[in-house]
Image (cartoon, rainbow, N blue to C red):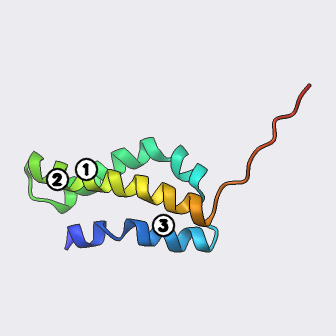
Amino acid sequence: IGFGIAFELPVITFFLAKIGLVDDRMLKDFFRYAVVLIFIVAALLTPPDVISQILMAAPLLILYGVSIYIAKIFNPAPKEEEEEE
């Protein structure tokens, strides 16, 4: 069940991007925290061995990257214009 729920990450990101709650810059800025959170979730949803945890965390990290790309397509962050002084 844990693996099935985990692979819904890009779908959830798609819907959140479509309604404007996330954009690609937000997901990129949150990446460090997402790595820690992914490993915590993988540790909680898998049996207590390192191999299972890595087998769940690695695809989740890849899916997080796919989610950033999906958010960039459907709700890109506005480009910031640099002010010249």
Which residue: 36% across, 58% down? 63
Q: Which residue is mark 2?
A: 55
Q: Amino acid at mark 3?
A: Thr
For mark 1, does the 10 Å Cα neighbourhood hold few (<14), some (14 to 19), or many (20 or more) residues? some
Give residue 59's position: percent from left, percent from top: 27, 55
Circle 2 sits in a helix, a strand or a loop, which is it? helix
Is residue 50 visible from the viewing direction of this image?
yes
* Mark 1 → mark 2, Cα distance in angstroms: 6 Å
Percent x, y for residue 40? 28, 51
The spot of residue 20 in percent (x, y) is: 64, 68
Question: Against 85, is 79 above or below?
Answer: below
C-alpha separation, residue under disc 3 versus residue under disc 1: 18 Å
Q: In the picture provided, is 65 more to the left or to the right than 81?
A: left
Q: From the viewer's perspective, tell me whether residue 24 is left or right of residue 58.
A: right
Query: Which image quadrant: the C terminus?
Result: top right
Is residue 72 toward the left or the right of residue 45 in the image?
right
Mark 2–mark 3 contact, CB under 8 Å? no
Cα–Cα gap, marks 2 and 3? 22 Å
What residue is at 40 percent from the left and 55 percent from the top? Answer: 64
Q: Name the residue rendered at 7%, 49% in the picture.
A: 49
Amino acid type, callout 1: Ala
Q: Quadrant of residue 32?
A: top left
Residue named by callout 1: 58
* Residue 22 can be seen in this image: no
**The N terminus - image quarter:** bottom left
Q: Position of residue 38 (x, y in %)?
A: 32, 52
